[in-house]
Amino acid sequence: MSSLQLDQVSRHLATRARWTWPEYAFWLAALASVFLLPGRHLILTEIAWLALFALSLDLILGYGGIISLGHAAFFGLGSYVAALLGKHAIINEPVLALVVSGAAAAILGFATSFLVLRGSDLTRLMVTLGVALIMREIANQIPQVTGGADGLQGVTIGPVLGQFEFDIFGHVGYAYCLAVLFILFLLARRIVHSPFGMSLRAVKGNPLRSASLGISVNARLVAVYTLGAFYAGVAGALLAQTTSFASLDVFSLERSADLLLVLIIGGPGYLYGGLIGAVAFKLIQDALATFDPQYWQYWIGLLLVMLVLFGRIYGAAIAAIVFLLTFRFPFSFFVCAAIVLLIGSVYGYIRKLIDAVDARVLALSKRVRSAWQMMLQRK
Amino acid sequence: MLTILFDGIAYGMLLFVLACGLAVTLGLMNFVNLAHGAFAMAGGYITLVLVNRAGVPFLAGLPIAFLASAVIGALFERTLYVHVYSKSHLEQVLFTIGLVFMSVAAVDYVMGSQQAFIQVPSALQGRFELFGIGIGRYRLLIIIVCGLLTVALQLILSGTRFGSRLRASVDDARVARGLGINVNGVFALTFAFGSGLAGLGGALGAEILGLDPTFPLKFMVYFLIVVTVGGTSSITGPFFASLLIGIGDVAGKYYVPRFGAFVIYTIMIVLLIVRPQGLFARPAGK
């Protein structure tokens, strides 16, 4: 490659790595929420660690292309390590404990990463799931350490950096989680725009071809899997530190499955997907739990089905319509299931309708854009 | 010792009947159906309602469970699953997990979240001694029913025209299509049949495995283990895998109760690393 081309390529990549204004807006809004929404800090804290957890899955799935149904293994390990460090007063300072928990999860991630290098999607699915189940079983079988099925209680967390004590309203907790999320996000953003991140994209796109270009595929996958595990461990530790509690639930399959949903709502492969997905998921969950406190998981399931069938926007819209139509009925679950089957049987027509709407929207946006450019030129 | 072997075989046979539908789904359409356990649960609860509330005899409830689950399976396959075959594995996983969530909540709503039991006739309860082996009557029934089913399945697969079509479709769907076999039709029928078997397994297994709304989540792993370990190219692979896992699980829980669950998961992970195509798989033809 001539130096001119190299120059062009590096300039192009630098442009792509530059911060855009929606990104500034996103983080300004996050910062503003610390001051403007003091009454919602508890749920915002949940959103913050869930976002970090989803970010870790995005690194593995969106950039590494590894389907994982057991990502909770690392989340849970980080959670237990942080809780144990706090309980036995080994490391009282949360930030240091966070790093240690993340490192523990990263070691587990490194060790198990060699298991996911081989095999098809299904094999990976099973292996990751198996690892999470084994971790859960271990935590269940050593109750003298983990508290078993009762969970680990009596965790005391020291003040952050020796300065800020956690309060019951979660103000410090939220600021702390958000700061950790932001720092780790910056790191992740730096990594995916580095040459290493570029090579990951290549590996995801075509492993065989990237191997023949001289990229060592397995080393890249091991590295990103370990990194993802570190992030997940930190997210788990944040949960343990802000709630002063850890239970077997952190390893559950539902957690891994919900996490997939979070990432799919936001969209994998551009880092913000996990963050946006976490906000959307928690808001949806919160709203559903007020409508239907006991069976909200049913409607989450409906959302999953519709998202897969009709894509992100239309799927969510159809799921919302079905939900509003049916949730007041007695036996609403069966009315809803019947409607879902009905929707499935007229799938082809709905698809056509969606395509038509898409075409209209595209034409309209083109017209608006050209009108806008005309205006600019006239000025 | 032999009693454990006997219990293990009964458990393994049950797993086989529950999981063999999934083996075909995965092998034929390369479709990851995590919701397979939901059909088993449907069969179990249908039998429960029939036997406990309507007073239908237990042995008559079993074929009804089979038929009802098969009909439900066919309905879902034709209306919903059919649109997801061409999507990626990730989307298939999300779709079927969504279905699992829905089924869990719906059953919880109707039947309550507590563990449910089907009233088994007294003739099937208790155990007797035979050559020094304690044999549970109910487990004997399971072995007989599942054994007959396995033989029947093997005969259907190897002896009938439908069986040869199915085998051809599993081996290479494209060529089978080219030869004029209606692969989708074969698949729909097989899916319904597999769901029916799962429903029957759910009804039979309620006594041993327990029946509660989280059934599909709890046993999903076991079904997947059977299929991934046994491979999807034949019916004997999953059969031996289920027996292995059934015996391993029962023996593991009996001899080393503290490590009971580890045994299964560890076997699975090791096998998957050593033989990613499954224990009994032939070298892939594709």
Image (tube, rainbow, N blue to C red):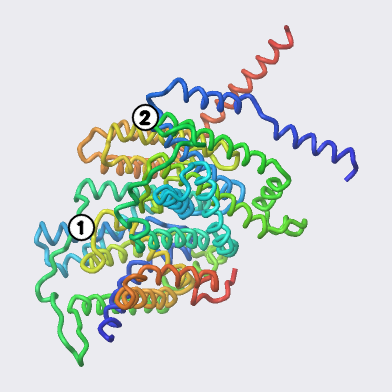
Q: Secondary structure at mark 1?
A: loop
* Residue A251 to residue A298: above or below: below
Question: What chain letter is assigned to the residue under label 2?
Answer: A
Q: Residue at x 33, y 67 (%)?
A: B18
Q: Within 10 angstroms of label 2, few (less than 14), some, or many (20 or more) residues?
A: few
Residue A109 is situated, as x and y percent measured from the top left of the image, at 55, 57
Q: Which residue is mark 1?
A: B115
Which mark, by number, is residue A169?
2
- The answer to whether A285 appears left or right of B277 in the picture is left
Residue A128 is situated, as x and y percent measured from the top left of the image, at 49, 59
Q: Secondary structure at mark 2?
A: loop
**Nearest the camera: A297 or B259?**
B259
Disc 1 to disc 2, how far (Cα)?
A: 38 Å
Instruction: Name the image quarter holding residue A304.
Output: top left
Same-subunit check for callouts 1 and 2: no
The nearer-to-camera label among 1 and 2 is 2
